[in-house]
Image (cartoon, helix red, strand yellow):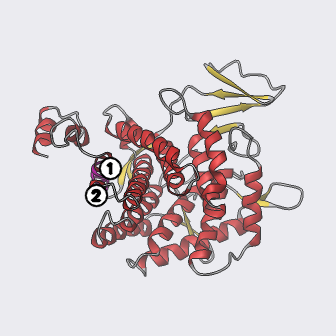
Protein backbone atom coordinates (compact mmCIF):
# COMPACT_ATOMS: atom_id res chain seq x y z
CA UNK A 1 0.00 0.00 0.00
CA UNK A 2 2.87 2.35 0.87
CA UNK A 3 4.45 1.95 -2.57
CA UNK A 4 1.12 2.63 -4.23
CA UNK A 5 0.74 5.88 -2.28
CA UNK A 6 4.28 6.93 -3.29
CA UNK A 7 3.42 6.35 -6.94
CA UNK A 8 0.21 8.31 -6.50
CA UNK A 9 2.17 11.24 -5.03
CA UNK A 10 4.77 11.13 -7.81
CA UNK A 11 2.17 11.05 -10.58
CA UNK A 12 -1.00 12.88 -9.42
CA UNK A 13 -2.92 11.87 -12.53
CA UNK A 14 -2.76 8.17 -11.75
CA UNK A 15 -5.59 6.60 -9.74
CA UNK A 16 -4.90 4.77 -6.50
CA UNK A 17 -6.24 1.58 -8.07
CA UNK A 18 -3.69 1.90 -10.89
CA UNK A 19 -0.95 2.66 -8.37
CA UNK A 20 -1.73 -0.48 -6.40
CA UNK A 21 -1.62 -2.65 -9.46
CA UNK A 22 1.62 -1.22 -10.82
CA UNK A 23 3.66 -1.74 -7.63
CA UNK A 24 4.63 -4.69 -5.47
CA UNK A 25 1.51 -3.98 -3.34
CA UNK A 26 -0.16 -6.56 -5.59
CA UNK A 27 2.19 -9.48 -6.27
CA UNK A 28 2.05 -11.15 -9.66
CA UNK A 29 1.15 -14.42 -7.99
CA UNK A 30 -2.01 -12.97 -6.46
CA UNK A 31 -5.16 -14.89 -7.35
CA UNK A 32 -7.60 -13.41 -9.80
CA UNK A 33 -10.26 -13.44 -7.08
CA UNK A 34 -8.01 -11.36 -4.82
CA UNK A 35 -7.54 -8.80 -7.58
CA UNK A 36 -11.31 -8.57 -8.00
CA UNK A 37 -11.71 -8.17 -4.25
CA UNK A 38 -9.21 -5.29 -4.18
CA UNK A 39 -11.04 -3.56 -7.04
CA UNK A 40 -14.43 -3.96 -5.35
CA UNK A 41 -13.08 -2.76 -2.02
CA UNK A 42 -11.47 0.30 -3.55
CA UNK A 43 -14.53 1.45 -5.48
CA UNK A 44 -16.93 0.82 -2.61
CA UNK A 45 -14.71 2.87 -0.33
CA UNK A 46 -14.51 5.61 -2.95
CA UNK A 47 -18.29 5.60 -3.35
CA UNK A 48 -18.77 5.73 0.41
CA UNK A 49 -16.30 8.60 0.80
CA UNK A 50 -18.13 10.57 -1.90
CA UNK A 51 -21.45 9.83 -0.14
CA UNK A 52 -22.78 8.44 -3.40
CA UNK A 53 -22.21 11.70 -5.27
CA UNK A 54 -20.63 12.19 -8.65
CA UNK A 55 -21.05 13.28 -12.26
CA UNK A 56 -23.00 11.52 -14.98
CA UNK A 57 -22.77 11.06 -18.72
CA UNK A 58 -25.96 13.14 -19.03
CA UNK A 59 -25.32 15.68 -16.27
CA UNK A 60 -22.26 17.61 -15.10
CA UNK A 61 -23.49 18.43 -11.58
CA UNK A 62 -22.04 16.63 -8.57
CA UNK A 63 -25.13 14.82 -7.27
CA UNK A 64 -26.45 11.68 -5.62
CA UNK A 65 -27.71 9.11 -8.13
CA UNK A 66 -30.62 6.94 -6.94
CA UNK A 67 -30.01 4.28 -9.60
CA UNK A 68 -26.40 3.95 -8.44
CA UNK A 69 -27.65 3.45 -4.89
CA UNK A 70 -29.97 0.70 -6.09
CA UNK A 71 -27.01 -1.14 -7.62
CA UNK A 72 -24.92 -0.36 -4.52
CA UNK A 73 -27.53 -2.10 -2.35
CA UNK A 74 -27.54 -5.17 -4.60
CA UNK A 75 -23.74 -5.24 -4.47
CA UNK A 76 -23.67 -5.06 -0.67
CA UNK A 77 -26.24 -7.86 -0.40
CA UNK A 78 -24.22 -10.06 -2.77
CA UNK A 79 -21.02 -9.49 -0.80
CA UNK A 80 -22.66 -10.10 2.56
CA UNK A 81 -24.45 -13.26 1.45
CA UNK A 82 -21.09 -14.58 0.20
CA UNK A 83 -19.36 -13.77 3.53
CA UNK A 84 -17.06 -11.27 1.82
CA UNK A 85 -18.11 -8.37 4.05
CA UNK A 86 -19.32 -8.44 7.65
CA UNK A 87 -22.80 -7.68 8.92
CA UNK A 88 -21.50 -4.44 10.42
CA UNK A 89 -20.03 -3.31 7.09
CA UNK A 90 -23.18 -4.32 5.28
CA UNK A 91 -25.55 -2.64 7.71
CA UNK A 92 -23.66 0.64 7.91
CA UNK A 93 -23.22 1.00 4.15
CA UNK A 94 -26.77 -0.06 3.31
CA UNK A 95 -28.15 2.40 5.90
CA UNK A 96 -26.32 5.29 4.20
CA UNK A 97 -27.80 4.33 0.81
CA UNK A 98 -31.29 4.07 2.28
CA UNK A 99 -30.89 7.49 3.86
CA UNK A 100 -29.99 8.96 0.46
CA UNK A 101 -32.97 7.28 -1.18
CA UNK A 102 -35.20 8.74 1.51
CA UNK A 103 -33.75 12.19 0.89
CA UNK A 104 -34.06 12.51 -2.92
CA UNK A 105 -37.23 13.55 -4.72
CA UNK A 106 -39.73 10.72 -5.23
CA UNK A 107 -42.79 10.59 -7.44
CA UNK A 108 -45.77 9.80 -5.19
CA UNK A 109 -48.51 7.31 -5.90
CA UNK A 110 -51.50 6.70 -3.65
CA UNK A 111 -49.53 4.36 -1.39
CA UNK A 112 -46.07 4.08 -2.92
CA UNK A 113 -43.40 6.07 -4.70
CA UNK A 114 -40.98 5.84 -7.62
CA UNK A 115 -37.60 7.40 -8.30
CA UNK A 116 -36.05 9.44 -11.07
CA UNK A 117 -32.51 10.38 -12.02
CA UNK A 118 -32.18 13.33 -9.62
CA UNK A 119 -31.33 15.53 -12.60
CA UNK A 120 -33.18 16.77 -15.66
CA UNK A 121 -32.96 14.62 -18.80
CA UNK A 122 -34.50 15.40 -22.20
CA UNK A 123 -35.84 18.65 -20.73
CA UNK A 124 -38.02 16.70 -18.30
CA UNK A 125 -38.41 17.82 -14.71
CA UNK A 126 -35.92 16.64 -12.10
CA UNK A 127 -38.86 14.89 -10.43
CA UNK A 128 -39.68 12.79 -13.52
CA UNK A 129 -39.56 9.12 -12.45
CA UNK A 130 -38.27 6.37 -14.74
CA UNK A 131 -39.41 2.77 -14.67
CA UNK A 132 -35.96 1.20 -14.96
CA UNK A 133 -34.54 3.45 -12.23
CA UNK A 134 -37.38 2.59 -9.86
CA UNK A 135 -37.13 -1.12 -10.64
CA UNK A 136 -33.37 -1.22 -10.02
CA UNK A 137 -33.78 0.60 -6.70
CA UNK A 138 -36.65 -1.64 -5.61
CA UNK A 139 -34.64 -4.71 -6.58
CA UNK A 140 -31.68 -3.46 -4.54
CA UNK A 141 -33.95 -2.93 -1.54
CA UNK A 142 -35.41 -6.40 -2.02
CA UNK A 143 -31.92 -7.92 -2.12
CA UNK A 144 -31.14 -6.27 1.21
CA UNK A 145 -34.48 -6.74 2.92
CA UNK A 146 -34.05 -10.50 3.22
CA UNK A 147 -31.17 -9.93 5.61
CA UNK A 148 -31.42 -9.19 9.31
CA UNK A 149 -30.28 -5.61 8.82
CA UNK A 150 -32.39 -2.53 8.48
CA UNK A 151 -35.71 -4.33 8.85
CA UNK A 152 -37.64 -1.09 9.27
CA UNK A 153 -35.69 1.35 7.09
CA UNK A 154 -35.14 -0.85 4.04
CA UNK A 155 -38.51 -2.53 4.54
CA UNK A 156 -40.37 0.78 4.47
CA UNK A 157 -38.58 1.89 1.31
CA UNK A 158 -39.21 -1.50 -0.26
CA UNK A 159 -42.94 -1.17 0.41
CA UNK A 160 -42.89 2.28 -1.19
CA UNK A 161 -41.07 0.91 -4.23
CA UNK A 162 -43.33 -2.14 -4.51
CA UNK A 163 -46.52 -0.09 -4.28
CA UNK A 164 -45.03 2.53 -6.59
CA UNK A 165 -44.40 -0.07 -9.30
CA UNK A 166 -47.92 -1.44 -8.83
CA UNK A 167 -49.31 2.09 -9.12
CA UNK A 168 -47.20 2.67 -12.21
CA UNK A 169 -48.64 -0.42 -13.90
CA UNK A 170 -52.13 0.75 -12.97
CA UNK A 171 -51.72 4.38 -14.09
CA UNK A 172 -49.04 4.41 -16.82
CA UNK A 173 -49.61 1.29 -18.94
CA UNK A 174 -50.08 1.17 -22.70
CA UNK A 175 -51.90 -1.39 -24.87
CA UNK A 176 -49.45 -3.33 -27.05
CA UNK A 177 -51.75 -5.77 -28.85
CA UNK A 178 -55.36 -6.06 -29.98
CA UNK A 179 -56.22 -8.38 -27.07
CA UNK A 180 -55.77 -5.64 -24.50
CA UNK A 181 -52.34 -6.67 -23.20
CA UNK A 182 -50.58 -3.68 -21.66
CA UNK A 183 -47.00 -2.83 -20.69
CA UNK A 184 -45.89 -0.07 -18.31
CA UNK A 185 -44.56 3.05 -20.03
CA UNK A 186 -40.97 4.19 -19.61
CA UNK A 187 -41.98 7.34 -17.74
CA UNK A 188 -45.09 9.49 -17.27
CA UNK A 189 -43.95 11.76 -20.12
CA UNK A 190 -42.26 9.14 -22.30
CA UNK A 191 -45.28 7.04 -23.09
CA UNK A 192 -43.50 4.15 -24.76
CA UNK A 193 -43.43 0.50 -23.66
CA UNK A 194 -39.68 -0.15 -23.42
CA UNK A 195 -39.13 -3.90 -23.24
CA UNK A 196 -36.18 -4.07 -20.86
CA UNK A 197 -37.59 -1.62 -18.32
CA UNK A 198 -41.00 -3.30 -18.34
CA UNK A 199 -39.50 -6.78 -17.91
CA UNK A 200 -37.23 -5.65 -15.07
CA UNK A 201 -40.10 -4.02 -13.21
CA UNK A 202 -42.52 -6.91 -13.72
CA UNK A 203 -39.93 -9.49 -12.66
CA UNK A 204 -39.09 -7.47 -9.55
CA UNK A 205 -42.75 -7.44 -8.49
CA UNK A 206 -42.98 -11.21 -8.90
CA UNK A 207 -39.84 -11.68 -6.81
CA UNK A 208 -41.34 -9.49 -4.09
CA UNK A 209 -44.48 -11.63 -4.07
CA UNK A 210 -42.36 -14.77 -3.76
CA UNK A 211 -40.22 -13.28 -0.99
CA UNK A 212 -43.37 -12.50 0.98
CA UNK A 213 -44.61 -16.07 0.64
CA UNK A 214 -47.40 -15.28 -1.79
CA UNK A 215 -48.31 -16.76 -5.12
CA UNK A 216 -47.75 -13.88 -7.56
CA UNK A 217 -50.92 -11.86 -7.27
CA UNK A 218 -51.19 -10.51 -10.80
CA UNK A 219 -51.51 -13.16 -13.49
CA UNK A 220 -51.40 -10.42 -16.11
CA UNK A 221 -47.82 -9.72 -15.01
CA UNK A 222 -46.70 -13.16 -16.19
CA UNK A 223 -48.63 -12.78 -19.45
CA UNK A 224 -46.86 -9.46 -20.07
CA UNK A 225 -43.42 -10.96 -19.42
CA UNK A 226 -44.20 -13.89 -21.71
CA UNK A 227 -45.30 -11.46 -24.41
CA UNK A 228 -42.04 -9.50 -24.08
CA UNK A 229 -40.14 -12.76 -24.38
CA UNK A 230 -41.95 -13.48 -27.64
CA UNK A 231 -40.71 -10.20 -29.17
CA UNK A 232 -37.15 -11.49 -29.48
CA UNK A 233 -35.47 -11.37 -32.89
CA UNK A 234 -34.13 -14.93 -33.41
CA UNK A 235 -30.35 -15.11 -33.43
CA UNK A 236 -29.95 -11.63 -31.95
CA UNK A 237 -32.08 -10.31 -29.09
CA UNK A 238 -34.71 -7.73 -28.29
CA UNK A 239 -35.14 -4.32 -29.89
CA UNK A 240 -35.65 -1.40 -27.54
CA UNK A 241 -39.40 -1.17 -28.08
CA UNK A 242 -42.13 -2.20 -30.56
CA UNK A 243 -41.22 0.76 -32.79
CA UNK A 244 -37.42 0.89 -32.34
CA UNK A 245 -34.78 -1.02 -34.35
CA UNK A 246 -32.07 -0.37 -31.71
CA UNK A 247 -30.61 -3.40 -29.92
CA UNK A 248 -28.47 -2.38 -26.95
CA UNK A 249 -26.16 -4.60 -24.86
CA UNK A 250 -27.15 -3.11 -21.48
CA UNK A 251 -30.82 -3.55 -22.26
CA UNK A 252 -30.31 -7.14 -23.44
CA UNK A 253 -28.71 -7.94 -20.10
CA UNK A 254 -31.43 -6.21 -18.06
CA UNK A 255 -34.03 -8.18 -19.95
CA UNK A 256 -32.26 -11.54 -19.79
CA UNK A 257 -31.65 -11.13 -16.06
CA UNK A 258 -35.36 -10.38 -15.62
CA UNK A 259 -36.35 -13.47 -17.62
CA UNK A 260 -33.95 -15.57 -15.52
CA UNK A 261 -35.70 -14.27 -12.39
CA UNK A 262 -39.06 -15.46 -13.69
CA UNK A 263 -38.31 -18.57 -15.76
CA UNK A 264 -34.96 -19.73 -14.37
CA UNK A 265 -31.38 -19.28 -15.54
CA UNK A 266 -31.28 -22.31 -17.84
CA UNK A 267 -34.31 -21.04 -19.73
CA UNK A 268 -32.24 -18.16 -21.16
CA UNK A 269 -28.97 -19.98 -21.86
CA UNK A 270 -29.49 -20.37 -25.60
CA UNK A 271 -30.63 -16.75 -25.96
CA UNK A 272 -27.56 -15.56 -24.05
CA UNK A 273 -25.22 -17.53 -26.30
CA UNK A 274 -26.78 -16.06 -29.44
CA UNK A 275 -26.76 -12.54 -28.04
CA UNK A 276 -23.10 -12.74 -27.01
CA UNK A 277 -22.17 -14.14 -30.41
CA UNK A 278 -23.53 -10.99 -32.00
CA UNK A 279 -22.09 -8.45 -29.55
CA UNK A 280 -18.66 -10.02 -29.02
CA UNK A 281 -15.77 -8.94 -31.21
CA UNK A 282 -12.11 -9.98 -31.31
CA UNK A 283 -11.04 -7.09 -29.09
CA UNK A 284 -14.11 -5.89 -27.25
CA UNK A 285 -17.90 -5.97 -27.06
CA UNK A 286 -20.08 -3.76 -29.19
CA UNK A 287 -22.53 -1.53 -27.34
CA UNK A 288 -25.36 -0.91 -29.80
CA UNK A 289 -26.77 -2.36 -33.00
CA UNK A 290 -29.52 -1.42 -35.38
CA UNK A 291 -31.76 -4.01 -37.02
CA UNK A 292 -32.46 -3.36 -40.69
CA UNK A 293 -35.39 -5.47 -41.88
CA UNK A 294 -35.82 -6.79 -45.41
CA UNK A 295 -36.60 -4.11 -47.97
CA UNK A 296 -35.58 -1.24 -45.68
CA UNK A 297 -32.97 1.14 -47.07
CA UNK A 298 -29.69 1.63 -45.20
CA UNK A 299 -29.24 5.08 -43.74
CA UNK A 300 -26.83 7.04 -45.97
CA UNK A 301 -26.01 9.50 -43.19
CA UNK A 302 -24.33 6.91 -40.97
CA UNK A 303 -20.92 5.37 -41.47
CA UNK A 304 -21.47 1.75 -40.44
CA UNK A 305 -18.22 -0.21 -40.76
CA UNK A 306 -19.64 -3.52 -39.58
CA UNK A 307 -22.66 -5.14 -41.21
CA UNK A 308 -23.89 -8.68 -40.49
CA UNK A 309 -26.56 -10.69 -42.29
CA UNK A 310 -29.25 -12.19 -40.09
CA UNK A 311 -31.93 -14.20 -41.89
CA UNK A 312 -33.76 -11.78 -44.18
CA UNK A 313 -32.40 -8.82 -42.18
CA UNK A 314 -29.09 -7.09 -41.61
CA UNK A 315 -27.54 -5.93 -38.36
CA UNK A 316 -25.64 -2.64 -38.38
CA UNK A 317 -23.06 -2.79 -35.58
CA UNK A 318 -22.45 0.79 -34.54
CA UNK A 319 -18.79 1.82 -34.06
CA UNK A 320 -19.01 2.18 -30.30
CA UNK A 321 -17.44 -0.12 -27.68
CA UNK A 322 -19.60 -1.38 -24.84
CA UNK A 323 -20.14 1.08 -22.02
CA UNK A 324 -18.91 0.29 -18.54
CA UNK A 325 -22.40 -0.29 -17.15
CA UNK A 326 -23.22 -2.60 -20.06
CA UNK A 327 -20.21 -4.74 -19.13
CA UNK A 328 -21.25 -4.71 -15.48
CA UNK A 329 -24.76 -5.97 -16.16
CA UNK A 330 -23.33 -8.52 -18.61
CA UNK A 331 -21.07 -9.87 -15.85
CA UNK A 332 -24.08 -10.19 -13.51
CA UNK A 333 -25.71 -12.32 -16.20
CA UNK A 334 -22.59 -14.41 -16.90
CA UNK A 335 -22.10 -15.04 -13.17
CA UNK A 336 -25.62 -16.42 -12.88
CA UNK A 337 -25.00 -18.66 -15.88
CA UNK A 338 -21.68 -19.77 -14.43
CA UNK A 339 -23.43 -20.82 -11.25
CA UNK A 340 -26.61 -22.40 -12.63
CA UNK A 341 -26.17 -22.83 -16.39
CA UNK A 342 -25.82 -26.14 -18.17
CA UNK A 343 -22.55 -24.97 -19.74
CA UNK A 344 -21.20 -23.39 -16.57
CA UNK A 345 -17.49 -23.80 -17.38
CA UNK A 346 -17.83 -21.86 -20.62
CA UNK A 347 -19.72 -19.06 -18.86
CA UNK A 348 -17.12 -18.86 -16.08
CA UNK A 349 -14.36 -18.44 -18.67
CA UNK A 350 -16.33 -15.77 -20.51
CA UNK A 351 -17.02 -14.05 -17.20
CA UNK A 352 -13.31 -13.89 -16.42
CA UNK A 353 -12.69 -12.05 -19.70
CA UNK A 354 -15.42 -9.55 -18.92
CA UNK A 355 -14.22 -9.09 -15.32
CA UNK A 356 -10.70 -8.42 -16.62
CA UNK A 357 -12.06 -5.88 -19.10
CA UNK A 358 -14.09 -4.15 -16.38
CA UNK A 359 -11.09 -3.81 -14.07
CA UNK A 360 -9.02 -2.44 -16.93
CA UNK A 361 -11.72 0.10 -17.75
CA UNK A 362 -12.16 1.15 -14.13
CA UNK A 363 -8.45 1.80 -13.73
CA UNK A 364 -7.96 3.65 -17.03
CA UNK A 365 -7.24 7.30 -16.37
CA UNK A 366 -8.77 8.41 -19.68
CA UNK A 367 -12.03 6.47 -19.22
CA UNK A 368 -14.57 9.09 -18.19
CA UNK A 369 -17.21 6.46 -17.39
CA UNK A 370 -15.11 5.38 -14.40
CA UNK A 371 -16.11 8.72 -12.81
CA UNK A 372 -19.85 8.15 -13.16
CA UNK A 373 -21.52 6.49 -10.12
CA UNK A 374 -24.25 4.81 -12.17
CA UNK A 375 -21.69 3.19 -14.46
CA UNK A 376 -19.29 2.30 -11.67
CA UNK A 377 -21.94 0.67 -9.47
CA UNK A 378 -23.15 -1.47 -12.37
CA UNK A 379 -19.55 -2.54 -12.92
CA UNK A 380 -18.88 -3.24 -9.23
CA UNK A 381 -22.12 -5.22 -8.95
CA UNK A 382 -20.90 -7.40 -11.81
CA UNK A 383 -17.54 -7.92 -10.11
CA UNK A 384 -19.26 -8.78 -6.82
CA UNK A 385 -21.42 -11.40 -8.54
CA UNK A 386 -18.40 -12.93 -10.25
CA UNK A 387 -16.39 -13.00 -7.02
CA UNK A 388 -19.33 -14.69 -5.29
CA UNK A 389 -19.39 -17.24 -8.11
CA UNK A 390 -15.68 -18.00 -7.66
CA UNK A 391 -16.14 -18.47 -3.91
CA UNK A 392 -19.06 -20.85 -4.37
CA UNK A 393 -17.12 -22.89 -6.90
CA UNK A 394 -14.11 -23.01 -4.60
CA UNK A 395 -16.21 -24.33 -1.72
CA UNK A 396 -17.37 -27.16 -3.96
CA UNK A 397 -13.84 -28.11 -5.00
CA UNK A 398 -11.80 -29.71 -2.22
CA UNK A 399 -8.61 -29.32 -4.28
CA UNK A 400 -8.86 -25.51 -4.30
CA UNK A 401 -7.52 -23.41 -1.43
CA UNK A 402 -10.58 -21.41 -0.41
CA UNK A 403 -8.41 -18.75 1.24
CA UNK A 404 -7.42 -17.62 -2.26
CA UNK A 405 -11.02 -16.52 -2.73
CA UNK A 406 -11.00 -14.09 0.23
Label 1 and label 2: CA atoms lie apart by 7 Å
**In this picture, which residue range is highlighted in magenta?**
36-48
Left or right of 177, for residue 162: left
Q: How many marks?
A: 2
Q: Position of residue 193 (x, y in %)?
A: 72, 53
Residue on which disc 1 sits: 33
Q: Is residue 67 above or below residue 114?
A: above
Can I make out residue 341 in this image? yes
Q: Residue at x 44, y 74 (%)?
A: 154
Residues at marks 1 and 2 touching, judged by CB atoms closer than 8 Å: yes
Residue on which disc 2 sits: 406
Check disc 2 and report its element: helix, strand or loop: loop
Asked which quadrant contains residue 296, the reply is top right
Q: Position of residue 95 (x, y in %)?
A: 35, 71
Q: Residue at x 67, y 19 (%)?
A: 301
Q: Which mark is residue 3?
A: none
Q: Is residue 216 above or below residue 17?
A: below
Amino acid sequence: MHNGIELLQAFPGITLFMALFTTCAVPLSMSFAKKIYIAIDFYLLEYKAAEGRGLDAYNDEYLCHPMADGKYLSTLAELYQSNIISLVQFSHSAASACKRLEGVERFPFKQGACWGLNFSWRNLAVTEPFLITSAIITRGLLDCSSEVLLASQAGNLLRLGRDGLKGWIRDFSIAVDDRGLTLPAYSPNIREPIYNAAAYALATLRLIDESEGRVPSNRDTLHAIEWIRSRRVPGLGWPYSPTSPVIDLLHQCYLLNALADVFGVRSIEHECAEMLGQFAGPCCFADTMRLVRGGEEFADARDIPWLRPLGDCFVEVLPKPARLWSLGELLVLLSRLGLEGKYSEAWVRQGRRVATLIMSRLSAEEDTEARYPRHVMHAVHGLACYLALLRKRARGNKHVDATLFI
